[in-house]
Amino acid sequence: MNPKRKQRLILVLFLVFGFASVVGLVLFALQENINLFYNPTQIAEGEAPEGARIRAGGMVVDGSIKRDDSSLLVNFELTDFNASIPVEYTGILPDLFREGQGIVAMGKVDGNGVFQADEVLAKHDENYMPPEVQEALEKSGKTADGKDVQPYSEKQAY
């Protein structure tokens, strides 16, 4: 083989292996930081991976908030009006957190089907709904207050 050709082949192989290594490292790093969104129905049906960090969104069920007197442990239920899942959170909840409100929580589903949240995010005003929660509610055919979505008709007067 020609020495010049051999040198080019070594250079090309070095670049290919280097590029493959960089892509592999980037994918490995991103795998640790990806937070997929699941609604309560998907979590209740077992679609969410157990033990993986995910985001869950929905509405806090009225009357479901239970606080532990001796710690910062809070238990509540999250719903998309098709299914509800129990959520356990230890920490200080946002000021705007309350029953009947849309939230997004980050955490993991444990072996008992309880969502162990390590971060809870609440909406910042009365009109805002996190896009993932809004989409999940629309798929369930419900509005944020739990009523059925009425299809638009031309006869409705505004």
Image (cartoon, rainbow, N blue to C red):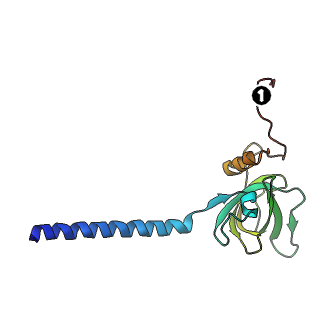
Q: How many marks?
A: 1
Residue at figure coordinates x 26%, y 70% from the top left? 14
Residue 56 location, quadrant: bottom right
Amino acid type, residue under disc 1 in the picture: Ser
* Residue 120 at x, y percent in the picture: 72, 61
Quadrant in the picture for the N terminus? bottom left
Looking at the image, the residue that sits furthest to the left is 2
SS under mark 1: loop
| Residue drawn at x 74%, y 63% as measured from the top left | 45
- According to the image, label 1 marks what residue? 153
Q: Identify the residue shown where x is 80% and y is 57%.
A: 83
Kindly tell me whether residue 19 is visible in this rendering: yes
Quick check: 16 left or right of 80?
Answer: left
Whether residue 104 is visible here, answered yes or no, is no
Q: Quadrant of the C terminus?
A: top right
- Residue 73 percent location from the top left of the image: 81, 71
Identify which residue, 1 or 155, lies in the foreground: 1
Compared across the picture, whether 11 is left or right of 127 comes to: left
Image x and y of residue 81, in percent: 81, 52
Q: Is residue 126 above or below residue 71?
A: above
The answer to which image quadrant residue 67 occupies is bottom right
Within the image, what quadrant is residue 148 found in?
top right
Q: Nearer the viewer, residue 34 or 67?
A: 34
Name above or below for residue 45 compared with residue 68: above
Could you tell me residue 5's position as x and y percent?
A: 13, 67
Within-10-Å neighbours for mark 1: few <14, some 14–19, many 20+: few
